[in-house]
Image (cartoon, rainbow, N blue to C red):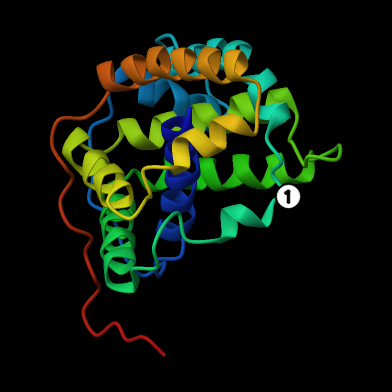
Amino acid sequence: MARQGKLFTLLGLVAGTALLRQTAFVPAARSMKPAIAAGAAAMLGTSPAVADEIGDAAKTLGEASYAFAKEVDWNNGLYLQAPGAFKPLEALKAIDKMIVMGAQADPALLKAANDAHREAIASISGPNGVTSKAAWNKVNAAIGRVVASVPESTVMDVYNSVKGITDKKVPNYLMSLVDKADAEKAYAGFLEFKDVVKANQVIGASSAAIVPSGDKIG
């Protein structure tokens, strides 16, 4: 359960951070796998020729995890604190891994993830600050597509770097704040979702972004 929460939060930060890159950076062309292409086509309002496997898996995940999501106090200031001992240098290394992942991800899918998060924020309601189920599903699908657009090794670099600054007591504490059965059901659903994303994941990273000659910051 704790790994699920951290991964979704973390990858949301990856998507948002990557969108802060200068628009002067032109990403190299890349080849999408069918499920990612289908998601991109849906985002652009065109008719995909293949099934949206990640989108469908996100809906299944929503059925398994939304009860858990409603129990989480999203307004809790706890999530603004370090997940363990304060380690500035290690935290910076983790952020660096996130930036690397963002730089490798498909720009169109990053924008779609950003838009999905914005819509989710607009649909927040209730005392716990939870978004709607539809928005929850849309965000998870968008994050899944972003993750699928970068190599597994890059994703694991982010996961492991955050794991390294997270206190081992955190998972049990977070579990104590929600219904254990709902949390375990959500985590099982997440593992199934992860498998679909992995099955549609690119193998190699795209080429580095191209910076136009003479480009300056400021």
Q: Could you say which quadrant of the image residue 147 lies in?
A: top left
Q: Mark 1, residues whose alpha carbon is within 10 Å: few (<14), some, or many (≥20)?
A: few
Rendering coords of residue 96 (x, y %): 28, 63
Under mark 1, the amino acid is Asn
Question: What residue is pinned by disc 1?
Answer: 75
Residue in the image at 37% along x and 25% along y: 37
Q: Could you say which quadrant of the image residue 63 lies in?
A: top right
Could you tell whether 50 is left or right of 27 in the image?
right
Residue in the image at 64% along x and 29% along y: 136
Label tally: 1
Rendering coords of residue 45 (x, y %): 58, 28
Q: Is residue 202 visible?
A: yes
Rendering coords of residue 94 (x, y %): 30, 58
Residue in the image at 54% along x and 61% along y: 81
Residue 144 in the image: above or below residue 162: above
Residue 76 in the image: above or below residue 73: below
Residue in the image at 42% along x and 29% along y: 144
Residue 205 in the image: above or below residue 214: above
Label 1: which secondary element: loop
Could you tell whether 32 is left or right of 126 in the image?
left
Q: Can residue 48 be seen in this view?
A: no
